[in-house]
Amino acid sequence: ELMEPETAGDTMRPELDMARERGFMNTSFHADNAVFLYLGAMRRGIAFDYEAAYEYLRKNAVDPKGPRDFLAEYDKQGWISDEIPAGNPSPPYAGGKAGAAKTLEYAWDDHAMAEMAERLGKHDDARRFRKRAANWRNVFDRSIGFVRGRTADGKWISPFDPAEPYYNFMMKEASGWSTLWLVPHDVQGLIDALGGPAAFNAKVDEFFTRPYNPKGICRDC
């Protein structure tokens, strides 16, 4: 985009055209993430009808009929719950909601939505999305220092082993160790939640040095 800014428009225009036809913006990966394309170009000063794009990005973020799975649950309680598999088998487990990881991704999306709304002068939207951007905290278990799944009644899922590779149960194609860092929009918040800079640095060091010997198979992670 920096070297050939016109290519950004070549990507954004057909995406917006498809959104006008379908009613929602195309999504990316396992959450929403569509806003990053437009906000990134907006930050770089690339000319585009961002107001038009925002209409559909906002629909993605607020309409439960849109592409964000379990959005009503996320909006109401601030996290997406997970259902414990029958017999709680060892991971990987394919039939789950990946609620903890999805909550983190939606919170990141919401942070980007807040910035885009602010840039467009939509201050009420910005406040709404900024509040939701803090939802990552709702799946962070301070007692163990990891992101962790919760059941619909709010209880932390147990047993939980952050070293195990979860496929679609709590995490998405990842372990608790790798999912922990998915808070790029609030790094200082994560540092504080882990106990400050020294504790955070120690956690990072442990992440890179701890031997990886899971019981489960790491599917697609």
Image (cartoon, helix red, strand yellow):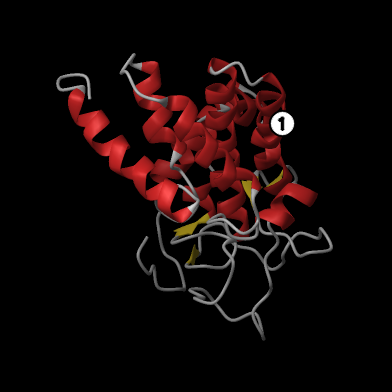
Residue plotted at (42% across, 47% down)? 19
- Specify whether 28 is left or right of 154: left
Q: Amino acid at mark 1?
A: Arg
Where is 56 relative to 101, above or below?
Answer: above
Q: Quadrant of residue 10?
A: top left
Q: Looking at this rendering, what residue extends furthest in the front direction?
A: 21
Q: Quadrant of residue 150?
A: bottom right
Residue plotted at (63% across, 47% down)? 146
- Specify whether 55 is left or right of 134: left
Residues 65 and 23: in front is: 23
Q: Residue 148 at x, y = what percent?
A: 65, 54
- Specify whether 99 is left or right of 30: right
Residue plotted at (40% across, 73% down)? 217
Q: Label 1 belongs to which residue?
A: 128
Residue 26: in sight, yes or no? no
Where is 212 relative to 47, above or below?
Answer: below
Q: Looking at this rendering, what residue extends furthest in the right direction?
A: 153
Q: Quadrant of residue 126?
A: top right
Q: Residue 41 at x, y = what percent?
A: 34, 24
Where is 101 relative to 194, above or below?
Answer: below
Residue 7: in sight, yes or no? yes
Q: Looking at this rendering, what residue extends furthest in the left direction?
A: 3
Q: Quadrant of the N terminus?
A: top left
Residue plotted at (30% across, 18% down)? 46
Q: Residue 106 at x, y = what percent?
A: 58, 45
Residues 11 and 205: in front is: 11
Residues 19 and 152: in front is: 19
Are there few (<14), some (14-19), or many (20+) residues within 10 Å of tag 1? some
- Specify whether 152 is left or right of 145: right
Q: Residue 160 at x, y = what percent?
A: 64, 63
Secondary structure of the residue carrying numbered label 1: helix
